[in-house]
Image: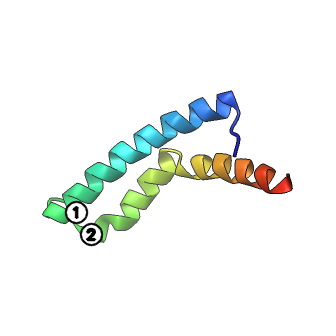
Amino acid sequence: MYIGESEQAESAQIDNDIKTYADEMVTKMIIGTESIDNYDNVVEELKRRGIERAIEIRQSAYDEYLKK
């Protein structure tokens, strides 16, 4: 799969932000400092941080790959 340079840079920034946040929240939920009841808020925060754009970039690259 090929992702263009600009999209690759954008995706890397989003991925880094999302991974850091998700790791932090999963850890907090496991050790009990964050309630699992806040899961919907975590999902909304991931969306705010661009997870849907990251998925869009990958889906586009995958769709192009399938055309070959």
Quadrant in which residue 11 is drawn:
top right
Quadrant in which residue 6 is drawn:
top right
Q: Which of 27 and 45 is in front in this view?
A: 27
- Whether label 1 touches label 2, CB < 8 Å: yes
Residue 29, disc: 1
User: Image point 28% across, 55% down: which residue?
Assistant: 25
Q: Which of 41 and 26 is in front in this view?
A: 26
Q: In this view, does 64 lie above or below 29?
A: above
Report, in whole angstroms, how far the alpha carbon at label 1 lies from the one at label 2: 6 Å
Q: Name the residue under label 2.
A: 36
> Helix, strand, or loop for circle 1?
helix
Mark 1: few/some/many CA within 10 Å (<14, 14-19, 20+): some
User: Image point 45% across, 52% down: which residue?
Assistant: 46
Q: Which of 49 and 64 is in front in this view?
A: 64
**Does residue 5 appear to the left or right of 23 in the view shown?**
right
- Residue 42 position, x and y percent, is 37, 58
**Does residue 50 appear to the left or right of 63 in the view shown?**
left
Residue 1, disc: none
- The amino acid marked with disc number 2 is Ile
